[in-house]
Amino acid sequence: MKEERGSWGSNIGFLLAAIGSAVGLGNIWGFPYKMGKSGGFTFLIVYLLLAIFVGFVIMMGELAMGRKTGKGTIGAYHDLSKKFKWVGWLAVFSPFVIMSFYSVLGAYCIEYLALNLSNLAFAGGAIMTGSDLFVAMLTNPFGAVIFTLLFMVICYLINRGGIASGIEKFNKVGMPALFVMLVIIIIRSLTLPGAVEGLKFMFVPGYAVEAGFIEEAPGFLTVLATAGGQMFFSLSLAMGAMITYGSYLSKKESLVKNSVIIVIADTIVALMAGIAVIPAAVATYGPSAALSGPKLLFITLQDVFSAMGTVGPLFGVVFYLLVLLAAISSAISLIEVISTFFMDRAAAKGKTGKRGKIVFWTCLAIMVEAAVVAIDGLGANGMWVPFQNAFGIIGEFNDCWLDFMDTLSEGIAMPLGALLMSIMVGWEIKPKTLLEEIDPSGKKWLRVFFSACMKVVVPIGMLLVLVGQIDTFFHLNIF
Ligand code: PHE
């Protein structure tokens, strides 16, 4: 059965795939902006502490759950727990919801890649401003759907290839390429006059307020919730991704070492992405530059490339290709969570689930929901959105389908899933069940660290993150 299921070709292949899953849009547009806005260096310290005491622990736990049971998310929860076996469903639901907008954002990257390629060919560079281009793209639902389809076809072709000859192969080329491109963009960004302001925004505590980037520094609990939410999303946790990837990992490999490397690599790339994009944006536009989310990527940075003259489109091509690679390598891990579930289920019934067919139906189902997000165009096309302005409190975070899907998955399902997982591991099945898998030699420090974190630190941390998210989403202002 194990052979039929497939496995990674090598540990480095697994690592690159896991890092590929972790490194994504979250690193490029989430981390740098949140870091600057939430107090620069202070945020970094909070983030690192959370990454060590929560992220690293959950990472080991998830990889162990997958490898111990040899099953994807739903199967793993089912085998391990009586009371929490339904949590697996949550961790398959979230990737499905996340993919509804992740694929559309991937499609936008392809559109901007095409734009810069054509600017390179026809020197059309600065004809339109970034914001005009963005609006033109959003109000063209047909184009958005076609490019979302293209993005999904690319993912389908990779996932169809399987673990070693699809996902691993892609990441083995894609991740090193991404790294090289990131270094190129960093060099360009830091050599722009005025780049140092951007570095100060990111790293100097309080600078964002002082220099007028934001009006007021957020309170500590808000910072904690922001850093916690970001860390989960960025490390691909509570989404079944690491359980799924872990289920294909050989028993020989060290889960502790692999988890350390994944967490460190993801954090380094997030910092590097910040150094690549923020100084360039700030050098060109100062404190008034839009530095967060889709605006940063598709308005501010496009303007930066347009302002660079003849070589601009070339940097544009490199940059959007880089972001596209990051998006694909994360998307394929989300798709794999869903398709592994169906393959395991077929195997449990004694059938051999045909990967190609399962991946096809998974991608098709995602395409249907993604079409809604694509047509909505971040709310530009006046579509109806569930719960919009409900109770007069849900507004800002529910302006469009993308925000709605994001709130549902990243905002609520992810921290809730992590909270339930830590309660299950810490209190129901007990940490030792997973520790046997994580470290068969039974090192004492690891046992104490893992147990204390799973039992106490993670549940409290997750509860705070969850309350913080709800507080922000619903404008309750508890914090
Ligand atoms: N970690 C990815 C990012 O930073 C997103 C992701 C979340 C991917 C969960 C897989 C699972 O963009």
Image: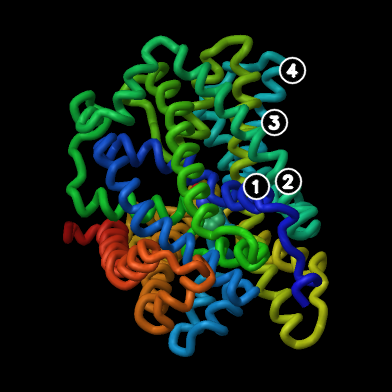
Name the residue that disc number 2 marks.
170
Q: Earlier in the sequence, mark 3 or mark 4?
A: 3
Q: Secondary structure at mark 2?
A: helix
The x, y position of residue 294, in whole percent, is: 48, 40
Look at the numbered disc 3 and give the secondary structure of its residue: helix
Who comes first in sequence, dot 3 or dot 2? 3
Question: Where residue 474 appears, x then y in whole percent?
Answer: 28, 61
What residue would you read off at disc 1? 328
User: In the rendered view, would you say 215 is above or below 90?
Assistant: above
Which of the labelled discs sits on residue 233, or is there none? none
Specify the amino acid type for callout 3: Ala
**Mark 4 CB within 8 Å of ligand 1:** no
Question: How far apart are the two marked residues, 1 and 2, measured between alpha carbons?
Answer: 9 Å
Q: Residue at x 27, y 59 (%)?
A: 468
Inter-mark Cα distance, 1 to 3: 16 Å
Q: Are marks 4 and 1 in contact (CB under 8 Å)?
A: no
Crowding near the residue tagged with mark 3, few <14, some 14–19, many ≥20 C-alpha atoms within 10 Å? some
Using the numbered discs, state the Cα–Cα distance from disc 3 to disc 4 in whole angstroms: 10 Å
**Secondary structure under the numbered disc 4 in the rendered image:** helix
Tell me, for residue 121, which label it has, or none: 4
Ranked by sequence position, the earlier of labels 4 and 1 is 4
